[in-house]
Image (cartoon, rainbow, N blue to C red):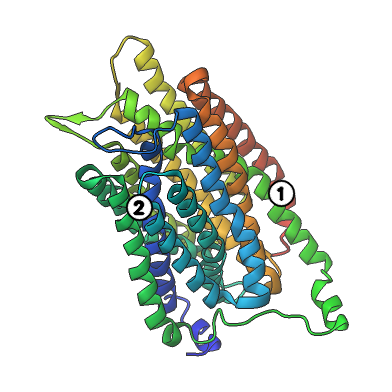
Amino acid sequence: MSQSTATQHSQKGHPPALYLLSATAAGERFAYYGMRALLMLYMIAGLSETLPGMAFSKSTSGLVYGTFNALCYGFPFFGGIIADRFLGKRRSATIGGILIALGLIVLSLNNSLLPFAAGLTLMALGNGFFKPTVVTMIGDLYEQGDPRRDNAFTLYYQLFNGSVFFAPLLCGWIAVQYGYRAGFIVAGAAVLISMLVYWILAPKMLGNIGKAVHQVSSSAEKSEKTTLSKEEKDRIAVIFTLFFFVTFFWTGFEQAGSSMTVFTEESVNRTIGSFTIPTPWFQSLNPLLVFGFGFAFSALWMKLAAVGKNPSTPVKMGLGMIFLGIGFVIMLGAVAQLQSGAEKASMLWLIVAYLFHTFGELMLSPIGLSMVTKLAPARMVSMFMGIWFLPTFIAHLLGGILASFIETLGPGLIFGGIAVFVIVLGTGVFFLSKKLLYMMHGRD
């Protein structure tokens, strides 16, 4: 199938390659979120405990957690440049998948510092090659102006979150039965399986998509390639403006794996009858809700687009930040319950908070991915997809610092501070939305 063949489908359906790329991402996301659900608990567990770990302090664990996740979203900037100029997206995705799987295998070797550091480093490098390439190939499936684009990214987001739902459940159960390192092995196996499917089916389903390398052969061509038009400059300005706001969205959202995980472990009543829900399982709530509500959001955008009332990208992203803030306001209810004398907070607070966080994610994350493929110059799209992950890089660093203060500041101050800040910023996006929409020059 050639690239033109891959993109020529009816306006009602999606090319089969969308589902292949979604499945490939699903394996990588299973590995990442399965490992992430265990990482904080693995670091704070003592060497002699039933489930032995690294015996780090909570403060150190929070900083390591934030730094590792930050690198997973920082390296894609460089990986995107390498893919655009030297390797192509298809080859970069393959390298990334192999490095991620290798990192998980190394991480599972033993509870010593060398395999721990080496395993996390390999995973972060693998993400650098994988993240900016698979998702931009989805953008390549659709022509500019195709109304299916936002819908496609929401569908992609929903499909791979199906695997993210099962990741903490399976890896968490394996960890409880056989230890944290066994959970890492299961996560690594998921990557290898998804990459095997990708290697077998990509030649037929993707055709030439992802093979192109944007090399510059002469000084004249270099000047032509690097000169940006006024419209391109305006669109890039919109990308960077929204990146600023997105940084603080992810700073709050990614507390799920750090401060909210510690709060769940220590302060939430996880018992139903005689069964105590393992803490990692709560990280399956978000992908379950994404999978459940993704259909509704995807259908909503298509329906609103059909009648000319689809909100602009900036408006959707502003709403996403406000929904995130509401989720943290709800977490304050759990803190208040503890302060009123309850031994443990009800898990209902946590469930409802994750619901609003999910609404925020669906309003912001898949729409942001679609935005980059619409606004970035075609010759730089992988690089800009890498730049799209830089706010998450910064957010993880900030989030790790916040999580390291949970013992000294307390969860109430952390949750409340995040709530106020992101709601204020989300409101600010609304005030800027008309100006940003004008600067997008029709690619809203």
What residue is shown at x 29% (from left), y 57% (from top)? 186
Which image quadrant: the C terminus? bottom right
The label nearer to you, 2 versus 1, is 2
What residue is shown at x 56% (from left), y 74% (from top)? 89
Callout 2: SS: loop
Rendered image quadrant of residue 49: top left
Callout 1: SS: helix
Q: Residue furthest left?
A: 274
What residue is shown at x 34% (from left), y 32% (from top)? 46
Q: Position of residue 428 (x, y in %)?
A: 67, 38
Distance Cα–Cα, label 2 vs label 1: 40 Å
Amino acid type shown at disc 1: Thr
Q: Is residue 56 above or below residue 147?
A: above
Q: Which residue is mark 2?
A: 108
Local crowd at mark 2 within 10 Å, few (<14), some, or many (≥20)?
A: many
Amino acid type shown at disc 2: Ser
Q: Position of residue 213 (x, y in %)?
A: 65, 80
